[in-house]
Image: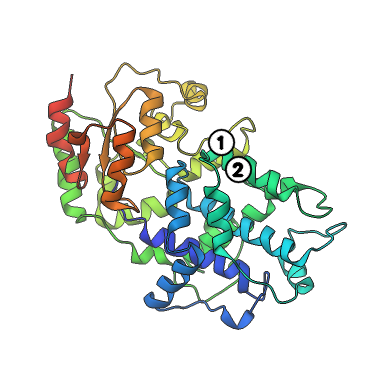
Amino acid sequence: MCFLSEERCFDVSALTVEELLYSPRYLNLDGSKFRTDYTNEEISGIRSTIFADDRVLKRFKEAGLNSNWDMLFITFALMYIDILKQENLNLAGVDVTDLNAVGDMLGEVTVDPEAVVEFISRENFTKDEIYRALIEYAGTLQNLEDPDVFKMYGPIWNQGHFKYQEWYLGSELVEADTGKPAEELQKTGFIYDEEWIVEPEAIKEMLQGLKAQGYIVGVATGRPRQETLLPFDEVGLMDVFEERRVSTASEVMAEDRSTAAYALTKPHPFSYLWSLYVQNEALFEAAVDGRNESDEQIFIVGDSVADFYCADKIGAVFIATLTGLTGDDIITTFDELNVPKEQMLKNVLGVPELVETLVK
């Protein structure tokens, strides 16, 4: 279900790309631009620039891409490749994963978010097709020895992941999460400034009502575990959930790294199945294969195309909430996916009443 707004996650993604571009530790295109504290107005400006007034984010969402780590990585990677092409650098013997060293080789370059928009909009890419197209694009760089450094979970992805976690969790918590000490010591952490879509008490009351009627509730989220549990704990929501029915990006990423055949992030239904299966190791292979071994009637409540595809894959009833990035604008997309109008809700508080009408 959709409880927390994605807005802060998108803000942090933009700040991460900004840091990789401008920090003296990384490409250092203009070190004077980089800071560790910004006003909300400045953050809005950075996000508007990096993601081209959110057009980049919207296109990712349309493609079924749901991970902020992946969205910021693809955005930065395309900008980085575009910069290398501008400079026409001969990359023979150059370690392009050493952003600071490459930054020293650059002259005056232009960061062009429109190049990102153009690339991801040139075809009706699915999530997996975007990944493949990125590697092919990297392969067009002059004498790049290994385009696979631009793969998901590769060295450039990992740098973005760490910086995102540092921004989101803050300097004090990032080492416990990543095993790597903070590089910047002044980041307070956006985890303490989360925005709830509706009041947490109303959410808790709604969930408790569902449980009282005999329904089992769980969570399948693209957020990492710590970023899920901390806000939930603060408002008492974890009292409602059995912990093994909460599957997060942390579990997905751990399995992704050992599953070379395909990614398990949404729209793969692994996280939903893993919560459904109470993280039962005997059903792990079924979850990885996207097989629904349950006879239960399942409802998936989500605000994205990726959530719809997960529900469709496992034969669940999909309930859409209009609380995602595009708000009511996504109605047209859900219409095209044949989601019934009555299964589109303003927010999660309408779920109990709707479920009663849908139960077989």
Q: How is the structure coloured here?
A: rainbow
The picture quadrant where one finds residue 206 is top left
Vertical order, 118 against 283 (above or below):
below
Residue at 29%, 49% (x, y): give it.
Answer: 329
Residue at 79% from the left image edge and 71% from the top image edge: 105
**Circle 1 Cα neighbour tier, 10 Å, few/some/many (<14 / 14–19 / ≥20):** many
| Residue in the foreground of this view, choosing between 95 and 225 | 95
Give the amino acid type for the residue marked by disc 2 in the picture. Tyr
Residue 279 in the image: state x and y as whole percent: 43, 30
In the rendered structure, find residue 131 and report the number of the disc placed on it: 2
Instruction: Say what amino acid the circle numbered 1 marks.
Output: Ala
Give how far across and how far down residue 160 sits, in percent: 59, 58
Disc 2 and disc 1 in contact, CB within 8 angstroms: yes
Q: CA distance from mark 2 to mark 1?
A: 10 Å
236 horizontally vs 206: left or right: right
Task: Classify 211 as above or below 7.
Answer: above
Q: Position of residue 347 (x, y in %)?
A: 21, 47
Q: Which residue is mark 1?
A: 263
What x and y, as percent, mark residue 14? 49, 64
Residue nearer the viewer, 43 or 229: 43
Q: SS of the residue at dot 1?
A: loop
Residue 3 in sight here: no
- In terms of depth relative to the viewer, which is nearer, 90 or 242? 90
Disc nearer the start of the sequence (2/1): 2
Which callout, 2 or 1, points to the residue nearer the camera? 2
